[in-house]
Image (cartoon, rainbow, N blue to C red):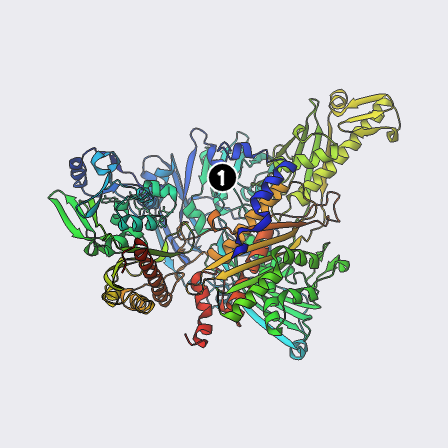
Amino acid sequence: MKPTAFEYFAPRTVEEVVAALAGGDTRVLAGGQSLVLEMNYRTVRPARLVDINRVAEFTGLDAGDGVLRVRPLVRHRAFERDISAGPLGRLLSSVVHNIAHPPIRARGTMLGSLAYAHPAAEWPAVATALDAQLDLTGPDGTRTVAAEAFFAGPFDTVRRPEELLSEARLPLLPDRAGVGFVEHRRTHASFAQLAAIAALTVRDGVIDWVRLGLVNAAERPVRAHAAERALLGQPADAGTLTGAARVAGEQDADPREQPHASAGYQRHAVGVLVRRALEAAVRDAGAVGDGR
Amino acid sequence: MAQRAGGDDSEFTRRAADGGSAPSRREDARLVRGAGCFVADLLPEDCLEVVFVSSPVAHGEMGAVDVDDARRMPGVAAVWSAADLPAVPQTPPMLGITASAGRAWPALAVDRVRYVGQPVAIVLAADRYVAEDARDAVRLDISPLPVLLDPTDAAGSEVELFLGMPNVAVEKEYGDPIDPAVWRDAAVVVEGNYRQQLLAHTSMEARAILIRPEDDDGLTVWCSHQAPHRLRGDLAAALGLPEERIRVVVPDVGGAFGGKSETYPEYLAVAVAARRLGRTVRWVEDRAEALTGPPHGRGQNQRTRMAADADGRILAYELTIDADVGGYPHLGAFVPLNTSVMAAGAYQIPRVHVQTRCVVTNTAPTSPYRGAGRPEAATAIERTVDTLARRLGMDPAKLRQRNFIRPDALPYRTPTGFQYDSGDYPAALALAMRTVDYDGWRAQQAQRRRTGTGAPLGIGICSYLERSGNAWEFGSVEACPDGTYLALSGCCSTGQGHETSFPQVVASVLGVEPELIRLVEADTAIVPRGIGSYSSRSMQTGGAALHRAAGALMEQARGRAAESWAVPIEEVTYRAGTVSAGQRRVSLADLAAATGPLRADEVFEPPQAAPYGTYIAVVEVEPELGTVSVLRLVAVDDYGVVINHVIVRGQSYGSIAQGLGQALYEQVRYDPDGVPETRSLLDYLIPTLSEVPPVTLREMCTPNPNTALGAKGAGEAGCIGAPAAVINAVVDALDLDDPSAIQMPLTPFACWQARQPALAGAGR
Ligand SMILES: Cc1cc2nc3c(=O)[nH]c(=O)nc-3n(C[C@H](O)[C@H](O)[C@H](O)COP(=O)(O)OP(=O)(O)OC[C@H]3O[C@@H](n4cnc5c(N)ncnc54)[C@H](O)[C@@H]3O)c2cc1C
């Protein structure tokens, strides 16, 4: 479990990072919590590493103009505290406690997780569900890709090797939004078997805005469009939530057989998790106070 | 759920209370501060690092191994396949198991490979990075052959893993065949099919060996091991060296669990390389290698059948085992025999018959894994007894009480030929039931079932019998002129705290402070003989040997004093490190200084013992997702006399965690081509502190009648008792009629799937 030889760069500016990435066969080293493991297993053998940990402008997390901007050195741990971005902050902090364990959260980054695109990772599904915008910076400048178009498959994204994921912008949620996150996993520190993310608003007892995401329910993170359609404009009652949850399991999920979960089980479990996430979100919206 | 907090006696308060009455572990001062010294910490200058090129194919015909490119890489000292060695040593058979005759396990593969990970070539380089580069540059040409992964399939397959030899390497029968009339005439007969999944040992420290060639053509070997003298003998035999030329030293060991008592092909290859190059060489296995084995543990397909009369008296029990011993039948072939001998559990059953086959397959070779055959035995009979209780509509506790071997029937010889020494099995169950509040939980379960509210709740019992200690052990105590005592033991601590507990034993006999006693073990240059630490044998056998040696030292001192004072020995008394007669009085230290070494050596072979106990688990199964929550786990164990409660409790907690691992989380998986899928701890899930439920430990004490010390084995109980308690609780919670519908690990999916017919029946 030792990596192959590689060259190591530790630039201090964005320009230097971009220049180094253009060299080919180069990887960004962010938190290293997935990359180093893969290098030790020699499943990846990059010729060069660009360690971005010294780039001062990559730190920082700020909310404004309706979005939360997440830069490349924002660690998972940053979301454990309330980042005071309203319901979005609440959602992110209920998600983050499910990611690995504290030492890994102290190093691993949200953008690293997005770039890595592990099928069972939480952040890609959060970004997809909430319609995050992702900035990719390369030799020709910066382009922006919607999260839903970013993920191409397990460990696969549309990011070109010479591009840096330089920023993720998560839209702030409506103030009166309720949020819910429910995860199913086998041990406390293991990856998720499945998880569901819900954010919604309720007006006069009717769901008038909703975002629903699924973790590890398909080859890519899922925005559960069919279930969202089943919810929009419907009363926020048990029948609606249960019905939509079933739709999520049957239509939005596209599970692969897994060692300890058949596809049928996963569809069923997606239904259970979505229902619970929706129930939590409706409760949360009620708690916020203007849910009717 | 109110009970969840663990009530009055949470493990933490008990532990804290214990600290005062039992010395804390001497070795912890260095181990918990990271100041221990493991094989990987010994890195002499100029030591070469070994990496093995191993087979990526589970079964195949070997073509040429092309090592040319690898050899040319800078920093590479040597790359050899079997073809490059004048002779390829073979792994010595273990414990006289004949299964390996004609099925030799070579240091490096010759002609064929039989599991993924089998060493094919050895790379020696300046460091591990270069060595792995060279490993990747070696080109293999292996033509795949059909792969066998299941022992029952392999036993019936046309494919021969060893040409001209059956895949069934050992076939054994215990007890007499049961007359068909017994089954025909019995009021009830129940059957079960159980799978004991393959497990990885997952010791914190994986395998490691460092070998330095010496000027006299001998070797000094540092190895993370459980049985240094055995390793010395094996290396000597395989290399054709006299034993005296080999010194084996075992430094600190980070866990072993049965996987480090054997001699592996890698060790032989490392020894050969060290001698050929005349250089110090080490191999430190990494986690990826360790998880994909060898060794693996468990791996049995079991079929059981049990007959009883209408009152629930068990009339007959039959167990059939197909055990996976992996690509080469090694120490793993002993494990199912242990299962067979222990098949009858705690019950007085007139007819018990066991048929066992140890079958070669293309998984990594198996070895004992903590429990080593007894968890398999306990799970088989305890699941079957529960099935019988269901069929009879009887409470499983009552059924057990009806069939237990009564205390006054002990010692008791089972129909499979093992002698249980002592104990009170009904009392252990009764204590466990009181401790857990069995009746309270049953009432709660009945209420939930009646009202259809709350998650399915189950209570599971496992009354287990273990078999501990075997063979002899060496112990020696010497009174040194400086007033200290030197104790030598043939055992070999792999984390069990011998440095603390063995001096306690010696001190209690001599009547001196334990601090005066220093223990040395695990160095064949200092300890003349020994067997090692496995089978929960250290205290029972090695401790008992030291106990006798300390007594013999007192006698020797009295004799020596009597001689020099010219008085009859009867007039010389021993007390607290001094001997006296009348006005004369001399310390053992001065006596040794004046008259020469005072040392007593003992080799002691007590019979095996049968520790026992009852575990009760209370579980809830989350009805929608199938997740099992263990709400309570009560463990009642009778280990005989306990020398150090802190250490023994530690053994209980550790083995319980591993037992829960088997019940709920762990499984080594292979794809259909025999390629391991569980290559990291992200795939092979083990319980951590977060997964361990509230555990309550209760001890009973029936001293071992066969030793003066009175200790029985205490190292493996949790692995034996916990799995069956949990699985019986889950079957109870899910109300499963077909007990074979669910197998370990009890993943959420497994529980959900097992419930499907019931759900369908309920119209969902
Ligand atoms: C035991 C364990 C348990 C874990 N459990 C979970 C879990 O439950 N949920 C979960 O989501 N994750 C889990 N992880 C993964 C963890 O969250 C990682 O931190 C994360 O996947 C990667 O983030 P990183 O910053 O460490 O990235 P790195 O490991 O540094 O990089 C990962 C990949 O992304 C690329 N990369 C990183 N940043 C950028 C960037 N800004 N632009 C372009 N490319 C980039 C790298 O080149 C590399 O290919 C676990 C990891 C471990 C070891």
In the foreground, B602 or B650: B650
Percent of width and height locating residue B599? 73, 30
Query: In the displayed structure, does residue B542 sit left or right of residue B453?
Result: right
Tell which subunit mark 1 falls on: B
Above or below for B230 versus B421:
above
Q: What residue would you read off at disc 1?
A: B209
Where is the C terminus of chain B found, in terms of image quarters? bottom left
Query: In the displayed structure, does residue A169 sit left or right of residue B35?
Result: left
Crowdedness of circle 1 by 10 Å Cα count: few (<14), some, many (20+)? many
Residue B83 visible in image: no
For residue B517, what is the image quadrant? top right
Above or below for B727 versus A6:
below
Percent of width and height locating residue A5? 29, 38
In the foreground, B48 or A204: A204
Amino acid carrying mark 1 in the image: Ile
Q: What element carries label 1?
A: strand
Above or below for B595 versus A153:
above
